[in-house]
Amino acid sequence: MASSAPRRGLRGRRGECGALDQVIAGARTGRGQVRVLRGEAGVGKSALVEYLVGSAAGCQILRAVGVESEMELAFAGLHQLCVPLMGKLDRIPSPQRTALSVAFGLSAGSAPDRFLVGLAVLSLLAEAAEEQPLVCVVDDAQWLDQVSAQTLAFVARRVLAERVALVFAVRTSSTPAAGGDAFGALPEIAVRGLHDDDARALLESVVPGRLDERVRDRIVAETRGNPLALLELTRGLSAAELAGGFGRPDARPLASQIEESYLRRIGSLPAAAQRLLLAAASEPVGDVPLLRRVAERLDIDADAAGAVEAAGLIEFGTRVRFRHPLVRSAAYRAADPTVRRDVHRALAEATDPDFDSDRQAWHRAHAAVDPDEALAGELERSAGRAQARGGIAAAAAFLRRATELTPDSARRGTRAAAAAQAAFEAGSPDAALELLAAAQLSPLDEVQQARLVWLRAQIVFARRRGGEALPLLLDAAGRLTRVDGTQAREAYLDALGSAVFAGRLHERTGVREVAEAARTAPPGAQPPRPTDLLLDGLVTWFADGFVEGAPLLRSALRAFRRAAALDGGDAMRWLWLTWLVAGDMWDDETWHELTTHAVRSAREAGALNFLPLALGYRAALSVHAGDFDLASTLIDEAATITEVTGHSPMAYPSLLLMAWRGEDEQAAEVMRSAAGDAISWGEGRAIGLGHYLLTVLHNGLGQYQDALTHAEQAVEHEDLSVVGFALAELVEAAVRSGAPETAAAALGRLEERAGASGTDWALGVLARSRALLCDGPAADRLYREAIEHLGRSRIAVHLARTHLVYGEWLRRENRRVDAREHLRTAHDLLRGFGASAFAERARRELLATGETVRPRSGPLPDLNREALTAQEGQIARLAADGMTNSEIGAELFLSPRTVEWHLGKVFTKLDVKSRNKLRAALSGA
């Protein structure tokens, strides 16, 4: 152990100190280390942090501390930590450098995605660690601003092979702050109270004179071995109380008792010393020169600094450091409000407006009592700058305070509405609703009222995609129709989306009723925007029929593909809806183009809030294309990202893959459970989707009666991107179950939809479905036609299934030689995809023709490929494509060193020596 570590603070901490020794050792040897020290206030986290720093000889130390008053200032904590590394900024890739510079206000630019900022921080730490092992320590991490906490948690998950240690000290609380939540999934060291023997020894070491054993044991029990409590709570007890036990027990929370102890000590200081302590508590950076300027403005003499240091509450060095974070909170909360405002005013006057105008405005806002339009306007400008840096939560905080300081009621309503919009975009729907309520107390014009109604509806829709938001969205669209035609049309699109997701659970106002209402929207722009074409196409489909709407929908999808190739804004905003429409149009090319662009753009921008959605849709396309391995990799990547961002994972791609694999005995139950979860929040479309997936599963397993039951339920409602696919499955299940009338009825509906689409995918599936109901030469011709169409599409799974059903038909026609050809093709394709159940169907049919089904041959056993993790597989693919470690790292949000570490494991598992051997090893050739 480091001899410089304070003995009292580390009494009884041998295990925790040993764990921290391992952290330092791991960082020194290039095995990135992350730990969260979690415990109640005063339990010893700060002492362990000091032990860690004292033990890290030969390492560079970076420190930051979360400050409660700075929780709403975006990137404040991250800036604290990274300031010493700014000289290395030119060593990281240009897009990352730009993002970090904009985030820290060093340069102007569009708002960077916070996870691109995270990648920049990762690269910056990795660069610094190349010169010297790096130890990053964040105390009171529960008080970090949200974006800093999320960014650092993102970085912490990606330091696997770096000479970097990140240690976060987080206070446990019954109401955890946003910062503390971000570190929940990281490795922890639980810091608990001392064992009774150690606690008694510590107590006896600080109490002069006699200590009654019963009093001692009571104090130990009440403090639960909390070291700071043992040291602080005895300060206010007299010798008689300690000797005889005449002090009364206090039932308040322990942190409150410790803070009360600090308050007593602060209250005993001279008034000037208390003001200096308050100024230090109000200034979170620990800037000593700034504090001196503030002291001059407040007429605080030099003796005050000596008094607070002598009291053991604060230290003045190169930076101001409090003895404990509770000293800071006690000093700030106990101050008279008038004195607190005076201090903030002095801090504002002493802050250089050219260097930190936003923090100056923040201090001025805390100093204000009465409404002040000039100050409110300044805060509004600060909000704009914060938003430009990607600090949407900070923008919401500035706008909220600007609202409070605005004297004019109409302007106050406008600012409250802007604050509500920012809060919603920042992921704080409750705060947004509160600000909406405040805005509605102001005199708003018709346009503002309509937009507020729309925002409220969007909040409800974002929380629950079912029908709860539908009447609100229709109300908003109707109001906007009178004042803003463009936004009215977008609100109607939102309403149609809500009706689609509500599905059969909201029959009272279904898609047809919403489409009829949307017909009252003002005409779209000329030339029409992609959203105008999409709205017109959906309205025509739902009100008049699929055939009538199909031409408009084809035009809309073409427009979105062009938009994606240009700037991608509308294409990304509406991907959730255009993906579904493209599915109903059997448009695999639009699926390919939109998802390719979406994934690439999200990666380039570091847009990790959007990337999981894009990856999920790309994974679904990969399933249809027969690339199950890639689909699995994309699904795993999306899940990893949603774990970081805290968003709910997208269930559909993994369920689709499970249905096509057909090898999980629990698959049916998993699908029913997922559908049940979606139904619980009002998403009726999940009912049809669940039945469709179960139909695919049972058709693969040859359980045709079960498939028929689910398929019939899947097509009961016009669920977008469900019913068309389910009709094709229904035809096969009904034919195999001996229900030709049901199959014929389904085929009639399918003919209408597939004919209106006209894609090779649609026409191929239609020809196959017709063949299933035919005999003789007509069936033979239709099967061949289906293979020809599907061979020109990207939908390899249906091409393989067409070979399968054609081979099954040929065998029943006693054309065994022809049957073997198609069944062998189907078996090889399906087994290669990983569609085990369908492949087994093909194997059984082959055996019935007298064919011997040989095991897969090749120099690379499947076991080797399966040994790769999803991330290793993805890195191996990219490396085989010729990408460098830096390029792979930028795409997968990893450092080049971590990519190199993963590739070393890949080479070992695949038994290859260089990158040029990877492609052959991965393909098994």
Image: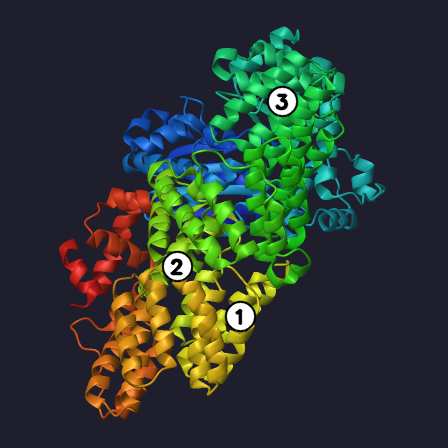
How crowded is the residue under tag 2: few (<14 C-alpha within 10 Å), some, or many (20+)? Answer: many
Identify the secondary structure beneath mark 2.
helix
Identify the image quadrant of the C terminus: bottom left
Residue receiving disc 1: 714
The answer, for residue 273, to whether it is visible in the render is no
Identify the secondary structure beneath mark 1.
helix
- Going 66% across and 34% down the picture, which residue do you hit? 450
| Badge count | 3
Residue receiving disc 3: 282
**Amino acid marked by disc 3:** Ser
- Rendered view: 411 above or below 374: below
Identify the secondary structure beneath mark 3.
helix
The answer to which quarter of the image holds residue 795 is: bottom left
Residue receiving disc 2: 757
| Left or right: where 885 falls relative to 634 | left
x and y percentages locating residue 291 in the rendered image: 57, 15
| Left or right: where 663 falls relative to 855 | right
Whether label 2 touches label 3, CB < 8 Å: no
- Earlier in the chain: of badge 1 and badge 3, it is 3
- Earlier in the chain: of badge 1 and badge 2, it is 1
